[in-house]
Amino acid sequence: MKYQHLDFMACPARRQLGLAAAIALTAALTGCAGFGGIAPQTQLQDPQALDAGPLLQSAGGDAAWPDERWWQRYGDPQLDALVDAALAGNPDLRAARARIAQAEGAAQIAQGATVPQLDTEAGFQRTYQTQQEFSPSPAFAHTYWKSDLLLRARYALDLWGRDEQALEGALDQVRAGAAEAQAVRLSLATAVVQAYAQLSMQQALREVLAANLARQQTLLDIARRRLAAGLGTELELNRTATQLPVTEAQIEQIDENLAIGRHQLAALTGQGPGAGEAIGRPRLALDHAAELPAALPAHLLGRRPDIVAQRWRVEARRADIAVARTRFYPDIDLAAFAGVASLNLTTLVTGSLADLGTAGFGPAISLPLFDGGRLRGNLQQQTARHDEAVERYNAAVIGALREVADEITRQHSIGQQLALNAAALDSARRAERQAEQGFKAGLTDYLNVLDAQATLLQQQRQQAQLVAQQIESHAALMAALGGGYQDPTIEAAP
């Protein structure tokens, strides 16, 4: 499409006539570039219309939403320091803040279009005019200066709200960026807690294996004494001795996992792997079961930063549609200039304002006529982007409810497993103690001790894993509930 630029600067009569003609032409050509048939095809998901299931409905109560520093509930100052370090030094979080700054810059650019523009222009040009330009007489051929110094002003009337909609869309992008930065912050804190829980599990497993290695060394000494006294056999001694290098290899594997876990935590805090060497034994504790706040689906919309970000993306896309529609209408700008002009550089500096002054003003109209479908294509593109943003929002809402339901299910299951494992662990300890006592007294062989130790070790491993899984799941639940975030632009009520 071409734009017909009609500049009315010559005289008041022509300006008024041209403006009236432009308005009439606009009305006549409305159908030349219409946007009929192009409209959004999607709607925002109402969380109340989703089946939350009996689990979430029964779990919802009077529990408070997570605190902004929810990880302090685990009672480990070292963890608190690691999370603080991550929130201060992680590159991903700094990158998110940089994206906010970019969006703010774009909003400032959009705001600039809504206010009058003022600039200056100075021109100095040396020109040779030939004799044939105005007259065949050689007397008319000469060289002259063309000089001017002007102050120009321009203001877009924005009759259709294009600039205002563009500014609002840019501000929505800033809001979305701020919410996304909070989502990165929450994801980062959750990652630190879960990596720390894994480190705690590995440390617990190492302590279990170290205690088991000490018992095996004691039993090996007993086996040697039994063999020396003629009460044991070489087979029994070899079986006892075989367990030590096996356990030592397992401890070596745990040490590898501990080192890698410390490297991971150091990276999450934005530091090199060497910083992880200072991380000591975790002391995590979770002394109460997870609870859910009331009215979960509705309130969750303002508590999850990822959902809030997606909602602002939708609003920004709506503004883009509005801007695309205004492009079907004419633009009317008011322009004016004032300054001095002269064909002689010296006169420009020394002459009087009355002799050199020049000024002008008037409207400038741009009217789209025929563009080969460019405007409709742009509107269709912006509408499709809006529909995509809506579906991303809908997916975020559905995913948020699923995550909460998953973690509540996992919390209940882990609680049951811990209770059952506690009973099995108690029985395994008694069986292992009885087998060792029988072996020391010569009442049973080492096979019974091996079997009892293997059972005890399995239950101890299971307990350490369940404790870590419980904390990891609790951290994931805190993240699923928004991690203490609340959208500052809306009320907490649904």
Image (spheres, rainbow, N blue to C red):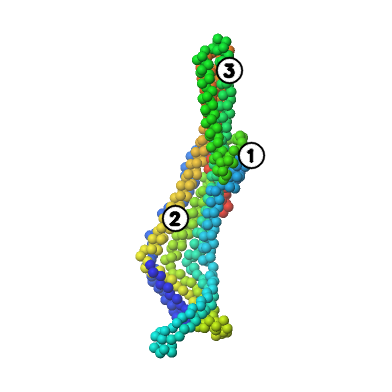
Residue 353, given in percent of the width and then of the height, sits at 57, 83
Residue 171, given in percent of the width and then of the height, sits at 53, 58
In the rendered structure, which amino acid carries the disc numbered 1? Pro
Q: Secondary structure at mark 1?
A: helix
Residue displayed at 48% across by 46% down: 397
**Disc 2 or 1, which lies upstream in sequence?**
1
Could you tell whether 283 is left or right of 22 in the image? Answer: right
Q: Is residue 81 above or below residue 336?
A: above
Label 1 neighbour load within 10 Å: few <14, some 14-19, many 20+: some
Q: Determine if residue 21 is in view.
A: yes
Return the residue nearer the eye: 216 or 369: 216
Label 1, label 3: how far apart the Cα atoms are: 42 Å
The nearer-to-camera label among 2 and 3 is: 3
**Disc 2 or 3, which lies upstream in sequence?**
3
Return the residue nearer the eye: 360 or 442: 442
In the rendered structure, which amino acid carries the disc numbered 2? His
Residue displayed at 49% across by 38% down: 406
Residue, disc 2? 386
Q: Secondary structure at mark 2?
A: helix
Residue, disc 1? 77
Q: To which quarter of the image does residue 272 belong?
A: top right
Q: Determine if residue 12 is in view.
A: no
**Disc 1 or 3, which lies upstream in sequence?**
1
Return the residue nearer the eye: 32 or 494: 32
Residue, disc 3? 221
Q: Secondary structure at mark 3?
A: helix
In the rendered structure, which amino acid carries the disc numbered 3? Asp
